[in-house]
Image: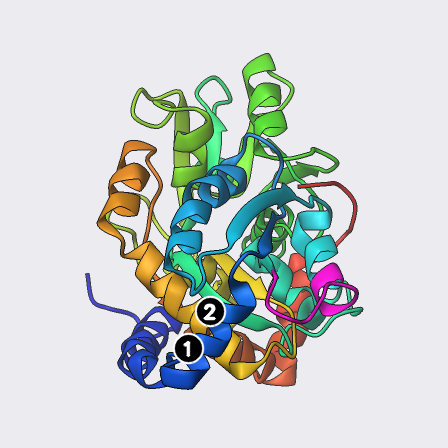
Amino acid sequence: MARTPGFRRSAAAAGFASLAALAFWAPSGARANEVADFYRGKQIYFMQSGGEGGGYSTYAQTFAPFLAKHLPGQPRVVVQSMPGAGGIRLLQHFAGKAPRDGTYLGMVQSGAAFAPLLGAAKTFDPLTIAWIGAMSRVAAVCAAWNTSGIVTWNDLLTKEYIVGSSGAGSLTETQPALLNKLYGTRIKIVTGYTGAHDIYLAMERGELHGRCGSGISSIEISRPGWVRDGKVNVPVQFAVERSKALPNVPTAYELAKDERTRMVMRLVLAPVEMNRPILTTPDVPPARLAALRAAFHAAINDPEFLEQAKRQRLEIEENPGDAIARIIADAYAMPADIIATAKEAMSFAGGGKD
């Protein structure tokens, strides 16, 4: 299959440039000592915006000890939850009241960074947030319970598909809304669930047909074997290119009917390139931000972490912090008419927790 232009290629190129520059910007000498002295003996709050027991919690709990290991001064890193509105609540906190000294880190749903652009949560500016790096580039999917009758893309066009969502800013709301508006699918979105675990329970009870806008890794973490054993079907994936894990599942990008729709999809698929991003507050001193980015890079490539991630079925594909900042800046610089179309298609509706 021919490669298609989009965020994946530009983000990858930016990633290589970021890694090349990392050694230059990493603190050294007096700056390194100053950063180590600051962090030594401190407690770092690592706040994740997902529900307890879900994928975000698992990623954060697994990653935190390795981040502490590679930070100068080896501070204690404590994971806390701040769910709400698909990550918007966490970003509002980080842009507002959270201390701006590098002691507060967050892991947030990637779609929340684009909420102000696409019509919701204009109370924070993602361009001012300090992005440390993203843990993966995993395509989101629509997953349907095996008794729902939803198996193929054509089924989404001809049958009602009832999915659970954790609210505005969450991909579980914006992605199915997008398919309804641009492609004519018949997806009914039920908001107000507290996270992945609640939605999966509702699927098992027959209250929902599925979840649309979550990664395969999220499903495998909470419900190991669901995909392998055929308990859920995957009719479409949200990506520019088909993932290696789902070579036979069409992408929303390739299903686009015209070039304008493809441009809109390149915008709304930007979150796929920065899955499970880690951030800190604006105005963190440059040497500390550099140290946080360097520690992120070292931790995510730590062989022991990668072995733990493999055992827990966590999909890992690093994207550096300055590449994440560029993805967001490029999205906010899109033509106004494309942004308006994407905004209308995704229909941020609000409500729910994640």
Q: Residue furthest top?
A: 205
The location of residue 290, given as percent across then percent down, is: 45, 76
Instruction: Please give the residue where the numbered disc 1 appears in the rendered image.
Output: 32
Left or right of 247 in this view: 54? right
Three-letter amino acid code at disc 1?
Ala
Left or right of 226 in this view: 82? right
Residue 83 sits in quarter: top right
Secondary structure, mark 2, is helix
Instruction: Please give the residue where the numbered disc 2 appears in the rendered image.
Output: 36
The location of residue 270, given as percent across then percent down, is: 48, 66
Q: Which residues are magenta?
A: 93-103
> Is residue 287 or residue 157 the one in the foreground?
287
User: Is 97 colored magenta in this rendering?
Assistant: yes
* Crowd tier of the residue under label 2, counting other residues whose Cα lies within 10 Å: few below 14, some 14–19, many 20 or above: some
**Residue at the spot 44% in from the left edge and 65% down from the top edge:** 133
**Residue at the spot 36% in from the left edge and 83% down from the top edge:** 29
Q: Residue furthest left?
A: 1
